[in-house]
């Protein structure tokens, strides 16, 4: 093999890498390695100037291999592949060394971290010399899209795609569209009608020639790969827009007892917009929810407002109302994250209470007031002007609600260790509204399994990249939008839905999909037909040909995880771009 000409590029990643790793020392070490024609460092290699530096060096210095020492390949391997491809180099002649997540972020000793970084770069240089020129292939793109969830995000995504002239299948588990927003009266901070927001979209979806809605339906399976998915949907009575699904004694049935029929749909992309569920307030015993009848949740108060009555269970208007924030959120016992919308919703309730019951006293009991959105700070100021009493309590130092004594002029008393005054304060209350946080739906794990995406520790679906690719997932062709990914407000949900739709429209416009050239291959001459690989593959990418008693990899489905390569007792499976020669060279480089 001829001596390659390798370019080594060490990214400082601002201070993420440079504050621990001596990037200049890594460059000096790389310059002395066999085959290295150029080695340099730059503050942000993923930036446009950083990529242009790589392109220029390939063209001017006649490089035929590139090593980038930076962050995880999961973040920017595609970025650098595109850069080398722009310079007419095969994109698989790139190798990345992870000196951020595997080095600077996990080590405090700069000297040892630098030595480890040098070892990782040396391993990458050894490995890249054995890379092969691989070619990706193109497959046809089905323009139809499956949207899971009929809330504001799902409706928005469906309309964006349908208005562009493409078929959309909208699957909603409930018997109506609108999601959680359908349970809301007004939206903060401008007090717009939630019903008006939804009515227009629902009317358009139900009458759109390119949208086929399935109500009371569930996805049973999703098979295939980007551009060529086959979805099986259980539809009530076999028709779209059917009644709510219910589980019957004789199998899945709709609300009228008719058996649900499977419907097969051919789609190219999937948008998951399944939303969230509200936190169960009864899990926090201090608040007395479920025991004290006038302690209600935010959604129960929304129902009161929509029905045009704000009253206690005794049927009288409340004189004292307390609103408690962060019920289930920002708590180490339940959920550490912030649910984002609760603070502004609580301020909205203060306005609605003062409007409906002018003489009532409203207490707003919070941990921190988060007024992050456009117009929200002004809304906070206006809330204080309507004489809302703001009291601050500490994290995990819950207020305690108890029934008032017969002589008191209120129904309940709330003990709060108020942070700003440093005093233990008792607040009178006839009605207590608990601002319950958002949490992942109970069926989120099943949805994740069906569409092949991941969840974080709280059950939210994980995006491909939190900043650079917030709507894509690690499964190509499957996108997420709205509150199934994390708590967010309506504008963010709508923006994410439109972003997901735009990504899909971009794929449809190209007419075909590029399939990664990195996948496993089976030598059918060496295959014994033991079928161990078929059972191991987490992506169902290996099929067994019974007539030939051999297995075969479906390359478009394969994610190159390597499970089959390691397990094959016959050694018949080879992973492209992860050959034994490449891996052994990398090991030699680390140990040198």
Image (cartoon, rainbow, N blue to C red):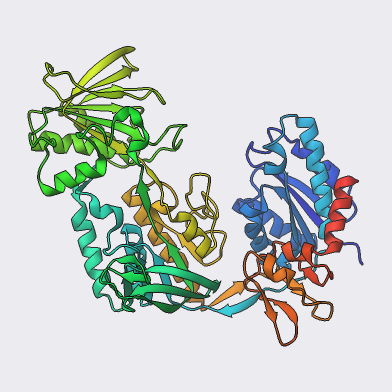
Query: Is 80 left or right of 357, judged from the image as shown?
Result: right
Q: Which of the 4 image quarters holds residue 380?
A: top left
Q: Position of residue 563 (x, y in %)?
A: 72, 62
Q: Is residue 507 above or below residue 561?
A: below
Query: Is 119 left or right of 279, judged from the image as shown?
Result: right
Total marks in image: 0
Q: Residue at x 43, y 32 (%)?
A: 331
Query: Is 10 left or right of 392, judged from the image as shown?
Result: right
Q: Which of the 4 image quarters holds residue 7?
A: bottom right
Q: Is residue 514 above or below residue 80?
A: below
Residue closest to the eye, 530 or 586 = 530
Q: Position of residue 495 (x, y in %)?
A: 37, 55
Residue closest to the eye, 55 or 507 = 507
Instruction: Judge whether residue 129 can be spotted in this image.
Output: no
Which residue sits furthest bottom?
Answer: 547
Which residue sits furthest front?
Answer: 249
Q: Position of residue 364 (x, y in %)?
A: 25, 28
Q: Quadrant of the N terminus?
A: bottom right
Q: Position of residue 165 (x, y in %)?
A: 36, 77
Residue closest to the eye, 526 or 531 = 531
Instruction: Judge whether residue 128 can be spotted in this image.
Output: yes
Residue closest to the eye, 554 or 269 = 554
Q: Which of the 4 image quarters holds residue 355?
A: top left
């Amino acid at each position: 093999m001829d001596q390659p000409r390798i370019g080594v590029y060490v990214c400082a990643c601002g201070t993420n890498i440079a504050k621990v790793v001596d990037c200049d020392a890594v460059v000096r070490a790389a310059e002395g390695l066999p085959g290295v024609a150029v080695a340099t460092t730059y503050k942000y290699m993923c930036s446009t100037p950083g990529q242009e530096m790589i392109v220029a060096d390939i063209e001017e210095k006649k490089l035929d291999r590139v090593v980038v020492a930076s962050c995880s390949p999961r973040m920017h391997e595609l970025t650098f592949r595109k850069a080398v491809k722009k310079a007419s180099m095969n994109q698989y002649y790139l190798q990345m060394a992870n000196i951020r997540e595997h080095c600077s972020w996990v080590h405090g000793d700069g000297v040892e971290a630098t030595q480890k970084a040098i070892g990782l770069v040396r391993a990458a240089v050894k490995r890249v010399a054995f890379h092969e020129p691989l070619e990706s292939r193109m497959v046809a793109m089905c323009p139809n899209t499956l949207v899971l969830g009929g809330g504001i995000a799902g409706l928005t995504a469906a309309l964006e795609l349908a208005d562009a002239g493409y078929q959309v299948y909208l699957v909603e588990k409930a018997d109506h569209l609108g999601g959680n927003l359908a349970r809301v009266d007004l939206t903060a901070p401008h007090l717009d009608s939630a019903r008006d927001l939804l009515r227009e979209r629902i009317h358009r979806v139900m009458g759109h020639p390119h949208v086929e809605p399935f109500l009371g339906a569930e996805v049973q399976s999703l098979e295939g790969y980007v551009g060529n998915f086959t979805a099986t949907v259980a539809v009530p009575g076999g028709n779209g827009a059917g009644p709510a699904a219910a589980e019957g004694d004789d199998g899945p049935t709709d609300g009228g007892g008719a058996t649900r029929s499977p419907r097969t749909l051919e789609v190219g992309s999937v948008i998951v917009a399944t939303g969230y569920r509200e936190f169960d307030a009864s899990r926090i015993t201090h608040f007395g929810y479920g025991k004290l009848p006038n302690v209600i949740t935010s959604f129960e108060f929304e129902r009161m407002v929509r029905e045009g009555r704000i009253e206690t269970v005794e049927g009288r208007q409340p004189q004292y109302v307390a609103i408690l924030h962060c019920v289930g959120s920002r708590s180490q016992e339940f959920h550490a994250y912030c649910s984002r919308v609760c603070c502004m919703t609580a301020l909205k309730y203060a306005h609605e209470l003062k409007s409906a019951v002018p003489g009532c006293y409203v207490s707003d009991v919070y941990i921190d007031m988060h007024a992050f959105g456009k117009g929200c700070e002004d809304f906070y100021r206006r809330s204080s002007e309507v004489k809302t009493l703001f009291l601050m309590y500490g994290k995990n130092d819950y207020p305690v609600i108890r029934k008032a004594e017969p002589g008191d002029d209120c129904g309940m008393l709330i003990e709060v260790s108020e942070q700003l005054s440093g005093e233990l304060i008792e607040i009178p209350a006839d009605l207590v509204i608990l601002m319950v946080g958002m949490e992942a739906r109970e069926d989120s794990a099943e949805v994740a399994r069906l569409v092949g995406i991941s969840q974080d520790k709280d059950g939210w679906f994980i995006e491909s990249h939190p900043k650079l690719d917030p709507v894509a997932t690690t499964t190509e062709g499957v996108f997420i939008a709205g509150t199934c990914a994390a708590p967010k407000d309506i504008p963010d949900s709508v923006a994410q839905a439109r972003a997901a739709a735009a990504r899909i429209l971009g794929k449809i416009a190209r007419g075909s999909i590029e399939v990664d050239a990195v996948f496993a291959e089976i030598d059918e001459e060496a295959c014994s037909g033991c079928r161990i690989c078929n059972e191991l593959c987490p992506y169902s990418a290996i099929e067994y040909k019974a007539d030939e008693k051999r297995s075969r990899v479906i390359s478009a489905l394969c994610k190159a995880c390597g499970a089959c390569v390691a397990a094959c007792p016959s050694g018949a499976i080879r992973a492209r771009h992860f050959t034994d020669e490449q891996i052994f060279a990398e090991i030699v480089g680390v140990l040198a």
